[in-house]
Amino acid sequence: MKVQIDFHKPMSVYFIGIGGVSMSGLAELLFTRGFSVSGSDAKESSYTRHLEELGIHVVYGQRAEHIVPGIDLVVYTAAIHPDNPEFAAAKATGLPLMDRATLLGQIMSHYPNAIAVSGTHGKTTTTAMLSCIYLNAALDPTITLGGTLPEIDSNLRIGASGHFIMEACEYTNSFHHFRPTTALVLNVEADHLDFFSGIKQIRESFTTFLGLLPKDGLLVINGEIPDYQALYAGLPVRAVTYGLAGGPFDYMAEDIRFDEAGHGSYTLSIRGKSAGRIELGVVGRHNISNSLAAIAAALEYRPVPEAAADTDLVAADAAASPYLTSAGLPPANPITLSEIASALKSFHGTDRRFQNKGIRKGVTVIDDYAHHPTEVTATLASARQGNYHQIWCVFQPHTYSRTRLLLNDFAEALSHADKVVLTDIYAAREADPGDISSADLLAKLTERGVEAYYFKNFEEIENFLIHNCTNGDLLITMGAGDVVNIGENFLQL
């Protein structure tokens, strides 16, 4: 039986894996809309405790008896398999089942301005930047992202307006279920190769996603993506480009500078016209690119008048896009450049994105979520902007498939650190295939002349760092697993 979420007709929804970052946010959103919400998770966490404090019933462990009469819909994630006892019980009793991505897409359909930020990397930071811009402009957005945003002290904000800002991940083609009116494409690179066969299939997946945009939809795309036009060729969308190199693009950064801490600033150019100076509160050249995407999405948004709903908006948008008003904005835009500039200057990043964790005996500890070679390179380039004696990178490879298929790329990326310490591979959703380990990455780094070490447990790594990091060094813990614990423990030793 197919179920359609309707905010005007609340129902009883049960979440399998309710403690996940995205699932907990969706559970809370439905709960605030009057839905009866409950769910299970493997263990207690800050997310489950928050849900319980709201009044949502959470059980720990997943058992068939949790699927009780009165539940109208069961929501699950891609990590839940058919043999899961709750999933199997729901199916056996004929309850409607819906995956997380489909639920998110149905929720998006309730918002006239639904912004989906996609790309191989940079999604969380760019979503956070755009969210801060909307918050600074007092537009009261609903926000869901894959990290904690300090400005809202959460990964979720529930607003009362028609603005919805979210991340859109390509893994398992989950973003094919979404219903955006605006889409951002930050980059398209080889990743999630345990699901995709290669870059050709990944590009096809992004094209399918962009095909979900309505004919009056806005596409903000990085013009530095190879053959980027082919991703949306033939689609009736209004495409706006941005970029740092090449071009010309609609939105560009000129006269780029960095302060001694690595924070970037630049002159914003919109379709060849200078629009003023932008200063960032985050580090790195990659974040200049992310900020351009957020700026373009904010400035190019234009509410569609109800009277024009049935007209050919594509032609109208094409005619309007080359010019700006006297204020430097596209017509009818509710966000000003000054609101954008102040929001970006005060934005200092999200949890686990070049996050300063503290200093111990002169050693600065940074934590970063980077787990793809491009991200690793960008993070280490940001670190080079600072005045540090040595850069130590404690890297935790994430998934066996990614490590095996991008082994040489990881070795190249990590070679930008002065010294590298490797943990065991974080398995995440995979089983150990027995044909790849961190020892293989160590060998590749050694071949490149990089001083690198590999330890099988965190305690050995922490002891090694205590005896080898010195005053003036930068220690970066890097990866999408639990490597953050090493830096936090280091600070306490």
Image: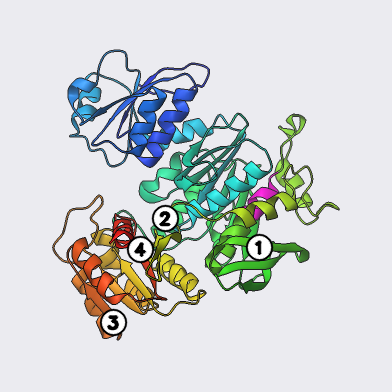
User: Badge 2 is on which residue?
Assistant: 352
> Which residue lies at the image location 53% right of the left edge and 49% below the top edge?
127
Q: Nearer the viewer, residue 386 or 180?
A: 386
Q: Give the alpha-carbon distance from disc 2 to disc 1, as whole Å.
A: 21 Å
Determine whether label 3 and label 4 are within 8 Å by CB: no
The picture places residue 412, in percent across and down from the top left corner, at 36, 77
What is the magenta range? 294-301
Which SS class for mark 4? strand
- Which of the two residues, 309 or 447, is positioned nearer the viewer here? 447
| Total residue callouts | 4
Q: Residues within 10 Å of mark 3 (few under 14, many from 20)?
A: some
The amino acid sitting under disc 4 is Met
Residue denoted by label 1: 279
Density class for disc 4 (Cα within 10 Å; few <14, some 14-19, many ≥20) is: many
Q: CA distance from mark 2 to mark 3?
A: 25 Å
The disc at residue 478 is 4
Residue 171: x %, y % from top left: 37, 50
Residue at (78% x, 65% y) in the render: 273
The residue that mark 3 highlights is 451
Is residue 249 visible in the rendered image? The answer is: no
The Cα–Cα distance between marks 1 and 4, rounded to whole angstroms, is: 26 Å
Looking at this rendering, what residue extends furthest in the right direction? Answer: 326
Q: Is residue 359 left or right of residue 280?
A: left
Q: Who comes first in sequence, dot 1 or dot 4?
A: 1
> What amino acid type is highlighted by mark number 2?
Arg
